[in-house]
Amino acid sequence: MKQTLSIHPTITIFVLIVLAQLAFAERTALAGVQTELTVAADGSAKYKSVQEAIMAVPAGTRDNPVIIRIKPGVYKELIYVQREKRFFHLIGEDASRTVLTYDLNANLIGKDGKPIGTFRTPSTQIDADDFTAENITFENSAGPVGQALALRVDGDRVRFRNCRFLGWQDTILLNRGRQYFENCYIEGHVDFIFGGATAFFERCHIHCLRDGYITAASTPDNQPFGFVFSNCRITGASASVKSYLGRPWRAFSSVIFLNTEMSAVIRAEGWHNWNFPARERTVRYAEFGSTGAGANPRARVSWSRQLSQREAKSITAEKVLRGTDGWNPRTG
């Protein structure tokens, strides 16, 4: 008569737990190998296309982010970081030599026989939260042909460090969420920083190519901050170029300049009402500590404000961007 080996249920459960832990550890190890990728335009790395590298990894996590290192080169391709691809980091070696570019513009005719419009023109579009880019140029090379986005951001907790943004009209659309720009260069001539997001620009260089408007915020009325520029510098392409600090795309547009050096490119009145006088009662435009030939507080429009030192001191990146989750852009 054969004897049947009996295994205690506790041992069975223990074995299953160990096997599950081993499987999880194996997946984690494999994921760790997969999370640092390299792209090289000259074909010297596994990936030649930035978008190909982005699509190679489903998503990252806070503890295991996806790092994509981009070698110097010009990458002419449409970049799209999908909503589910959180904790992605695009890192170049040198912004001036690492260029992500494309050339769509709003007047191009789409498959439906109609112009594609502004919102379908971004060379790079970020839909994911917790995205970071460093040492990269984002460009729309269409030139002065109308609206043509170099970048569109719909993600939250998004950071750009030591990056360049090149375009003409509507260079950067910050559509929603919170973004932090540090030591970045941004150029354009009409509404080239626009949208409804909350964004903090720290030590950035803003360059006006032609007469126009730097900002066109569409800040919602229940959002305390729109765009804040702190310790930035504003220059013009020539002595004849004149620009406004901003005009209100929507009624409660919010823009603040703190301790910003403004060249003579900035018009004395500072702000424009976009031919909507009623918006003068609702916009939230303010300055503190502006310097340079373009700083002229006495000549500014009456419906903008000069902040007190106490008010200005309270407007920090941590306060502007903390939201309900306490996000600190400097620490992540």
Image (cartoon, helix red, strand yellow):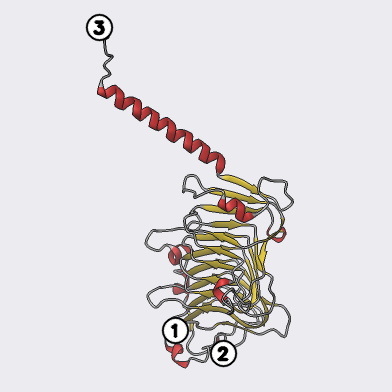
Mark 1 or 2, which is nearer the eye? 1
Amino acid beneath label 2: Ala
- Identify the residue under disc 2: 299
User: Mark 2: few, some, or many residues within 10 Å (few <14, many ≥20)?
Assistant: few
Q: Considering only order in the chain, which callout, 2 or 1, is on the residue closer to the N terminus?
A: 1
In the image, what residue occupies the spot 66% across and 82% down?
265
User: Mark 3: few, some, or many residues within 10 Å (few <14, many ≥20)?
Assistant: few
Residue 270 position (above or below residue 178): below
Could you tell whether 294 is left or right of 177 in the image? right
Mark 3 or 2, which is nearer the eye? 3
Q: Quadrant of the N terminus?
A: top left
Residue 233 position (above or below residue 275): above
Could you tell whether 274 is left or right of 327 in the image? right
Q: Could you give the CA–CA distance between mark 1 and mark 2, rounded to whole angstroms? A: 23 Å
Q: Considering only order in the chain, which callout, 2 or 3, is on the residue closer to the N terminus?
A: 3
Amino acid beneath label 1: Ala
* Res. 121 image quadrant: bottom right
* Res. 191 image quadrant: bottom right
Residue 18 seen in render: yes
Pick the residue in front: 315 or 322. 322
Amino acid beneath label 3: Met
Name the spot of residue 82 as percent of width and height, x first. 51, 58
In what element is the residue under mark 3?
Answer: loop
Residue 193 seen in render: no
